[in-house]
Amino acid sequence: PEFDFGFLHRLDVPSSGLILVATTYGAYYDLQLQLRSGMIGRDYVVLNHGWLKRRKVDARLHWKGNSPTRSGGQGKPSRTRLSKLLALAGATGSTFTMMLIRVLTGRRHQIRSHCMHIGHPTVSDG
């Protein structure tokens, strides 16, 4: 029988481009099981405009080709969990929240789209 090992998955294409690699057959199948069952978590720390009030976002994401990803309406089901780490107020009256974001589904531009959808765009987008 043929056994696999090596590259399993490329996470977050094309932003960070993290690569999940197994160096043994056992590790390959163990990581594959974890990946397919959702046991591998992806957490991000993100600075957003405004003060966070929501804890989760369940909004469909859709895109076509190279067009921007949009939230709401039709598309693939997408879930994101949000936690406030720090709330900040600027000298000019602007407000920010540093969030811990856990991507539960892993869609294209999910963090940016979901944050925009709830009215808290990332600082780089707003």
Image: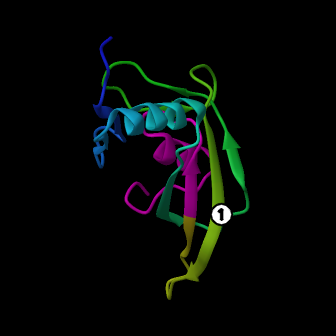
The residue to which callout 1 is attached is 83
Q: Residue furthest front?
A: 1
Quarter in which the C terminus is drawn = bottom left
**Eyeballing the image, is 2 above or below 68?**
above
Residue 105 highlighted magenta (yes or no): yes
What residue is at 32 percent from the left and 20 percent from the top?
Answer: 3
**Which corner quadrant of the image does residue 38 belong to?**
top right
Q: Residue at x 31, y 38 (%)?
A: 24
Q: Nearer the viewer, residue 1 or 49?
A: 1
Nearer to me, 41 or 1: 1
Residue type indicated by callout 1: Ser
Above or below, comparing residue 104 to residue 98 in the picture: above
Q: Kindly identify the residue that appears in the image at 59 percent across and 67 percent down.
A: 50
Q: Residue 79, located in which quarter of the rendered image?
A: top right
In what quadrant of the picture does the N terminus appear? top left
Left or right, residue 55 beside residue 6: right
Region rendered in magenta: 100-126
* Residue 99 location, quadrant: bottom right
The x and y percentages for residue 28 are: 38, 34
Residue furthest top as drawn: 1
The answer to which of 102 and 54 lies nearer the viewer is: 102
Q: Secondary structure at mark 1?
A: strand
Q: Which residue is at the far bottom?
A: 91
Q: Residue at x 48, y 36 (%)?
A: 30
Q: Is residue 50 magenta?
A: no
Where residue 16 sits in the image (x, y, percent)?
30, 49
Above or below residue 87? Residue 126 is above
Q: Give how far across and how far down residue 92 sits, in percent.
A: 50, 83
